[in-house]
Amino acid sequence: MKTLKVKLFGVLTEIAASSEVELNVDFLESIGVLELQAELIKKYPAMKLVQLKIAVNNQFVSDGQCHEGDIIAVMPPFSGG
Amino acid sequence: MKTLKVKLFGVLTEIAASSEVELNVDFLESIGVLELQAELIKKYPAMKLVQLKIAVNNQFVSDGQCHEGDIIAVMPPFSGG
Amino acid sequence: MDKRKVKSLFVEGPIPPTRLSDSIAHHEHKTNIGAHALFLGQVRADSIEDQVVSAISFTAHEDMANQIYSEIREEAFSKFEMTCAHVYHSLGIVQTGQLCFSVFTSSARRKMALEGCEFFVEQIKARVPIFGKEHFASGETQWKINS
Amino acid sequence: MDKRKVKSLFVEGPIPPTRLSDSIAHHEHKTNIGAHALFLGQVRADSIEDQVVSAISFTAHEDMANQIYSEIREEAFSKFEMTCAHVYHSLGIVQTGQLCFSVFTSSARRKMALEGCEFFVEQIKARVPIFGKEHFASGETQWKINS
């Protein structure tokens, strides 16, 4: 079991009642971001209603892997301007 | 012989050395604006080099007639902004 | 205030930048506005055959210019959903670096403000009888030709 | 001044209109400029289900936002011939009627200033991780959704 720290933004901070959460997940070298997203939604079902964008080490990714220690950020759609 | 007053603008005021000139032309009821333009160029040949726009009573016309007493304005291409 | 009342397009001399910020600040109570678009024309120190422009002096057929500007306003408000539009053009001398033309449009939506602003800019340049004369440092002048 | 140096997109609270006129006035010595284009986003008193928006509070993934803004600047300067561009977005509370977003582009030519400005507006709205939360007079809030 490994622990991934996930930074949250916008409405997600209200769903999780926090701007950073820890996910305990089981993986060896790395875990796919889609799998990570599924874990997050399992913990916070309301996030299923939000179109999530995931950044690993400050780069948006639609697929790919995260490793322990990576900086993971999950965001809802942008609404600046 | 009738006298038409013609207001000039932009470079035309320098060609005629005046912002208003009088043209003595021969017509009965009215004179065509193209004929008027020809008279103006006859008097000020350098105006031939300029693309002239003519307004009669504050309306641009490409054809049509002017009468004695009409307000006639002749302008070069616009260069505002 | 009727946004369509007849307004004069012209101001004497350059347009002061503070006029624009005052204008922006005055829109603070109009809370139906979501976007402003501004265009500012500044006199450029163009080089023309080894001479550098130091100023432009503007003249116009003022009556016709205001009449055509008023037609352009009517068209702009019928084409684009805007809450207001403020448009000014200088007459007389404007030095390089100073502003000679400003268009300021406001709308609930950004697209309308941006498109309305561009419409005013293009239509006024194309249709309003204004004549610019470039002044060089040497004292020579040359009538401006829009590209 | 290197126009491409890394700049922060963010200011705390509303953007004061005087900041814009100061910015315009500072360009007076840049006599190679012929046109400025500005876009200003103002917080609108939108009605949502009988409630009226009184303010928006903005948060962002600041590091990524500034990094993406910097990429957008690179793209803008390679696409459009501009002499400079000043772009700001608010963080924190901005009341209705106040400005939360400003884009200010300058160029020798009007087309480049106008198109560059619009490019920044659209790209920043679409690509920069900023999150707005609408506040109602009742004290209730709702996360903003861009249309």
Image (tube, coloured by chain):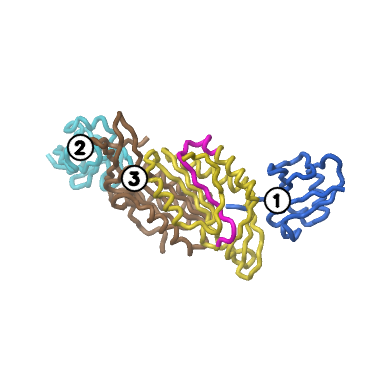
Chain colours: A cyan, B blue, C yellow, D brown
Q: Nearer the viewer, mark 3 or mark 1?
A: 1
Q: Name the residue beneath numbered marker 1.
A: B75
Return the chain for callout 2: A
Residue A81 visible in the shown view: no
Residue C8 screen position, x and y as percent: 56, 48
**Mark whose residue sits in front, 1 or 2:** 1
Q: Quote the CA–CA distance across marks 3 and 1.
A: 50 Å
Image point (16%, 33%), residue name:
A43
What is the C-alpha distance between the residues marked 1 and 2? 66 Å
The answer to whether one can see residue D146 in this image is yes
Q: Quadrant of the N terminus of chain D?
A: bottom left
From the image, tell me which residue sits under label 2. A14
Element at badge 3?
A: loop
The residue closer to the viewer here, D105 or B74, is B74
Q: Which residue is mark 3?
A: D128
- Specify start and end residues of the magenta stretch as a single range: C75-94
Is the same chain shared between marks 2 and 3? no
Q: Are marks 1 and 2 on the same chain?
A: no
Q: Residue furthest front?
A: B69
- Tell me which residue sits at (49%, 40%) in the image: C3
Decide whether residue B4 is among the magenta residues.
no
- Does residue A52 appear to the left or right of D17 in the view shown? left
Q: Amino acid at mark 3?
A: Val
Can you give x and y, in whole percent of width and height, for residue D117 in the image? 45, 48
